[in-house]
Image: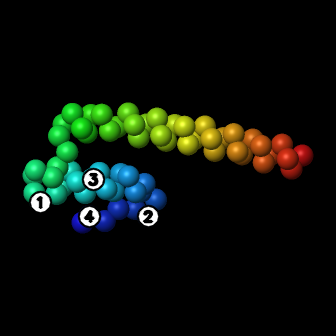
Amino acid sequence: MSEFSKDTPECYIQFANQCIDVNSFNRPSASCIYDEFPRWYHRLNNASKMNRTLVDIVYRLKI
């Protein structure tokens, strides 16, 4: 198992560890990797939008 920054998302750690698995049959295929990145982008983008909305709500409540 490799070391990752404490801020690294768990999904990334798990996927990276799959990619470097000693047993090549446990590694994801190129198409699996290709499909996974857009999922992460959308997940992170949606989380970012949610965070901005929450910050906006908190800001409005303080005024």
Quarter-of-image position of residue 37: top left
User: CB of mark 3 within 8 Å of CB of mark 2?
Assistant: no
Quarter-of-image position of residue 20: bottom left
Q: Nearer the viewer, residue 5 or 16?
A: 16
Give the residue at mark 4. Answer: 2
Please give the label number shown on residue 16.
3
User: CB of mark 1 within 8 Å of CB of mark 2?
Assistant: no
Q: Amino acid at mark 3?
A: Ala
**Of marks 3 and 2, which one's residue comes earlier in the chain?**
2
Q: Amino acid at mark 1?
A: Val
**Of marks 1 and 2, which one's residue comes earlier in the chain?**
2
Q: Amino acid at mark 2?
A: Lys
Q: Position of residue 32 (x, y in %)?
A: 24, 38
State the CA–CA distance, disc 4 to disc 3. Answer: 9 Å
Please give the label number shown on residue 6.
2
Q: How dense is the environment of label 2, judged by Cα within 10 Å: few (below 14), some, or many (20 and up)? A: few
State the CA–CA distance, disc 1 to disc 4. Answer: 12 Å
Q: Position of residue 25 (x, y in %)?
A: 10, 50
Q: How dense is the environment of label 3, judged by Cα within 10 Å: few (below 14), some, or many (20 and up)? A: some
Q: Position of residue 21 (x, y in %)?
A: 16, 57
Give the residue at mark 1. Answer: 22
SS at mark 2 in the image: loop
Q: Amino acid at mark 4?
A: Ser
Q: Judge depth for marks 1 and 2 and give the one in front.
A: 1
State the CA–CA distance, disc 3 to disc 2. Answer: 15 Å
User: CB of mark 4 within 8 Å of CB of mark 3?
Assistant: yes
